[in-house]
């Protein structure tokens, strides 16, 4: 009867800040999802153009080899990464799922650079309302801290961060 009196559990502030910081620092990432049940973070890149199945297969191989090499150089083992594509013509989405337990800020930067280098101008980038460089550098420092906190804290549920014009919105599902 008085459902408005029930308080919903608020999402972990570090998890919320992590998703928001990723979207602020990387304008090529259109949405970020964190799923607590499997500890995975999904980054979605939007692409505009006409692509063949082979384009995506080549990109997936390119990313897999690059990330494997990166993990080898960083001495990481057991990292989980999944890649998939939704759509082929017009606007499509490239989704990268990565476990938070071993994800680093440097790898996030690598993944965004790989997408930008491979797809070039076809990669949709939100350049509206990008904060100044000092703010971005501050967010980069926080990003590593939030990733470390996510490894140590128990975060329940599912969080989704999206771009909404000049804003970033993070909500719990």
Image (tube, rainbow, N blue to C red):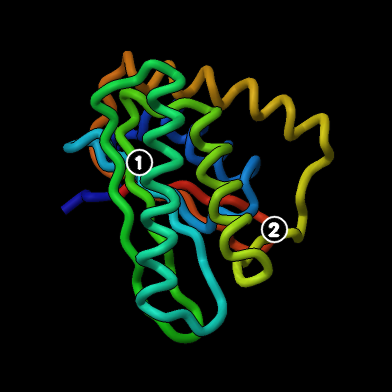
The residue lying toward the viewer, choosing from 56 and 8, is: 56
Q: Is residue 84 left or right of residue 17?
A: left
Query: Foreground mark, 1 or 2?
Result: 1
Q: Position of residue 95 (x, y in %)?
A: 38, 57
Query: Which residue is at a point 53% across and 28% down the rendered structure image?
Result: 105
Residues at discs 1 and 2 in contact (Cβ within 8 Å): no
Q: Which residue is mark 1?
A: 41
Q: Compared with residue 38, is residue 50 higher up or lower down, i.e. above or below?
A: below
User: Which of 82/134 is in front?
Assistant: 82
**Residue 74 picture location, percent across and down:** 44, 19
Q: Is residue 115 above or below residue 75?
A: below
Q: Quadrant of residue 115?
A: bottom right
Q: Which mark, residue 166?
A: 2
Q: Secondary structure at mark 1?
A: strand
- Is 57 located above or below residue 81 in the figure? below
At 36% from the left edge and 34% from the top edge, which residue is drawn? 11
- At numbered mark 2, what does the secondary structure look like: helix, strand or loop? loop
Tally the numbered discs.
2
Could you tell me if residue 99 is visible in this image? yes
Question: Can residue 159 be seen in the rendering of this structure?
Answer: no
Report the front residue among 56 and 140: 56
User: Toward the viewer: 79 or 25?
Assistant: 79
Residue 39 % position (x, y): 25, 33
Q: Residues within 10 Å of mark 1 (few under 14, many from 20)?
A: many
Earlier residue among tags 1 and 2: 1
Q: Residue at x 59, y 62 (%)?
A: 164
Q: Residue at x 37, y 54 (%)?
A: 61
In this picture, residue 119 sits left or right of residue 1: right
Q: Label 1, label 2: how many angstroms apart (C-alpha)?
A: 23 Å
């Amino acid at each position: 009867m008085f459902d408005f009196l029930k308080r919903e559990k608020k999402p972990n502030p570090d998890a919320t800040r992590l998703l928001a910081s990723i979207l602020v620092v990387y304008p090529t990432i259109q949405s970020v999802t964190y799923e607590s049940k499997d500890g995975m973070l999904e980054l979605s890149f939007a692409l505009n153009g006409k692509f063949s199945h082979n384009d995506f297969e080549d990109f997936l191989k390119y990313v897999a080899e690059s990330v494997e090499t990166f993990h080898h150089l960083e001495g990481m083992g057991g990292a989980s990464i999944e890649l998939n594509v939704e759509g082929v013509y017009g606007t499509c989405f490239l989704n990268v799922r990565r476990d938070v337990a071993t994800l680093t800020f440097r790898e996030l930067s690598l993944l965004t650079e790989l997408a930008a280098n491979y797809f070039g101008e076809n990669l949709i980038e939100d350049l509206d309302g990008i904060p100044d460089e000092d703010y971005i550098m501050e967010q980069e420092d926080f990003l590593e801290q939030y990733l470390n906190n996510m490894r140590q804290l128990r975060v329940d549920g599912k969080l989704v961060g999206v771009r909404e014009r000049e804003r970033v919105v993070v909500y719990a599902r």
